[in-house]
Structures are given as C-alpha cells and as structure tokens.
C-alpha cells in the first residue's frame, strides 16, 4: 500500500520498481485526489486492474486517514500480509522480499534506518536531526525497544493489524507510525527490524510540516500519561 499526494513524478516508477522486486504482490495506491493527476497515471498503468489498484479519496485527509482506508481495503479483501511504503522511492523496493520474509518469525517487520546495516542518504541535516531526536524521544517516553519508531516502510501480518486495531487508531499525521509500533508492543506482538537505506526523494516535494511533528510529540506524551494514569487507577 502506497499513500500518495502529488506524486505524479514518482508513482509510475515506484509501481514498476515494486512489481520488479516483488512480482507476486498487488499494489494499492491510496490517493487523496492529488491536484497533479497522480490518480490518472495510476489508472493508465499497464497493470491497472490486475496487479495495480487505486483507492480514490475525495481530498487531502491526512496520512493516518489514508493508511486506515488502505488497510481496511486490504483486510476486507483477505490479504494475509500487507506492506506500506512511501511513493517517493525513499524506501528501497528491493527490500520488500526481506520485509515479507521477516514475517515468517514476526508479526510486524519494520524497515529500519537505525539498526546495524541501515542508514539515511542525502537527507538535509535538520531532517536527520528531527528523525533521530524524535526516535530518542519516543523510545524514552514510551519505553519501546524498536529503534525506528517513525518508519513508514513496514510489513504486517493481517492478524497483527487486527490485534493492533489499526482501523481504530487516532493519528492524522506521521504519529500513525509511532501509534502502531506502540500498540504492537503493548499487545505483545513480535516486531523485528530489517535494515534499509532511506534515500531522500529525488522528485516532488515533502509533505512533512511543523504541525505534523507537533502532533507526534504531543500524542506520544498523551499516550504515556494515559498509560500511567490507568496503571495508577488499577
Ligand atoms: N494519501 C495521502 N498521502 C500522503 C499525505 N501526506 C503525505 N502522503 C504520502 O505519504 C508519503 C510520505 O510523505 P513525504 O512527503 O515523502 O514525507 P517525508 O518523506 O517525511 O518528507 C508520500 O508517498 C506522500 O505522497 C496525505 O495527506 N494523503
Ligand atoms: Mg518522503
């Protein structure tokens, strides 16, 4: 599943790269009515209707809502393993087989920048700092052992998505990734990290914003406070 907003320059390339790396996979693009015509390019793809599918949403409703719609689509259709990745080729499609293979012994596989063998290429220093600092903060506040809690490249067993209650998650923006990692941890699921090299996008522009980062910081704190309160009440 690949969420897209204004990814006309990337969407064809990412579909082709996924198909080459993992030809047995179906691709679902979840598009929020991108003004640049991303959805038209998907519908014009030669594999559209066979390996390639499109979920058209009426407008920019945020990344969390797009993911929930995509997961609901896949769960309804009975897929038993589901991966998510960005459209901008920051997540190397050639690591998809490794992510799915990791599900043999885990419920969730995280494509991780912050384990041995993983890394980040061409990212501006401030994006590196936000990502690194954010991960230290999340691990400290929530006490989870996953190193890349904000990763957007992940594979799940369908049973794990149901256990996480992914469709009930509350996050709008990138805290969606943290929320699922945290819920998987608290519900006793096995999460493993598969090293990947994340490369900054070459085409199109980032949709990351200050308000998305602030949402993540405040939600993480709120989740922890709610946990501590619940423990005290017990
Ligand atoms: N459907 C949908 N996709 C989005 C939205 N915001 C971001 N995306 C997609 O989510 C992925 C990650 O966004 P990106 O801008 O690359 O974030 P960055 O890598 O953190 O700078 C890309 O495939 C975007 O097109 C949204 O509101 N709706
Ligand atoms: Mg990106």
Image (cartoon, rainbow, N blue to C red):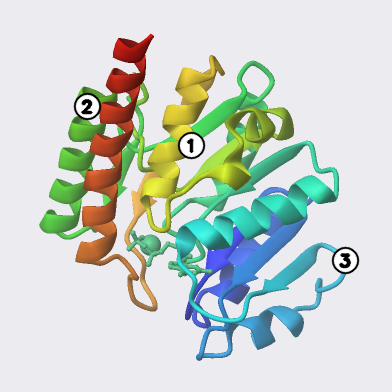
Q: Earlier in the sequence, mark 1 or mark 3?
A: 3
- Quadrant the C terminus occupies: top left
| Numbered disc in front, either 1 or 3 | 1
At mark 3, the secondary structure is loop
Q: How many marks?
A: 3
Q: Earlier in the sequence, mark 1 or mark 2?
A: 2
Whether 70 is drawn above or below 113: the answer is below
- How crowded is the residue under tag 2: few (<14 C-alpha within 10 Å), some, or many (20+)? some
Whether 78 is drawn above or below 98: the answer is below
Whether 214 is drawn above or below 47: the answer is above
| Numbered disc in front, either 2 or 3 | 2
**Is residue 55 or residue 164 the one in the foreground?**
164
Judged left or right of residue 170, residue 143 is: left
**Is residue 11 or residue 189 the one in the foreground?**
189
Percent x, y of residue 43: 75, 82
Q: Which residue is mark 3?
A: 50
Q: Earlier in the sequence, mark 2 or mark 3?
A: 3
Q: Which residue is mark 1?
A: 180
The residue lying at 70 percent from left, 70 percent from top is 55
């Amino acid at each position: 599943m690949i969420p897209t907003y204004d990814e006309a320059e990337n969407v064809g390339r990412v579909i082709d790269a996924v198909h080459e790396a993992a030809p047995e996979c179906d691709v679902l693009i979840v598009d929020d009515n991108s003004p640049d015509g991303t959805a038209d390019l998907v519908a014009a793809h030669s594999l559209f209707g066979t390996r390639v599918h499109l979920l058209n949403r009426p407008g920019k409703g945020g990344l969390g809502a797009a993911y929930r719609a995509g997961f609901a689509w896949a769960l309804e259709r009975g897929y038993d393993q589901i991966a998510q990745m960005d459209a901008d080729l920051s997540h190397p499609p050639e690591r998809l087989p490794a992510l799915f293979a990791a599900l043999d012994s885990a419920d969730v596989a995280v494509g991780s920048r912050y384990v041995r063998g993983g890394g980040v290429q061409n990212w501006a220093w401030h994006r590196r700092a936000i990502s690194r600092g954010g991960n230290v903060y999340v691990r400290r506040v929530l006490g989870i052992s996953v190193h890349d809690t904000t990763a957007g490249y992940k594979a799940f067993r369908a049973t794990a998505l149901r256990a996480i209650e992914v469709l009930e998650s509350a996050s709008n923006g990138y805290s969606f990734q943290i929320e699922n990692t945290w819920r998987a941890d608290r519900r006793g699921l096995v999460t493993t990290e598969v090293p990947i090299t994340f490369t900054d996008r070459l085409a199109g522009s980032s949709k990351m914003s200050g308000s998305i980062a602030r949402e993540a910081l405040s939600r993480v704190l709120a989740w922890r406070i709610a946990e501590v309160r619940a423990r005290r009440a017990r």
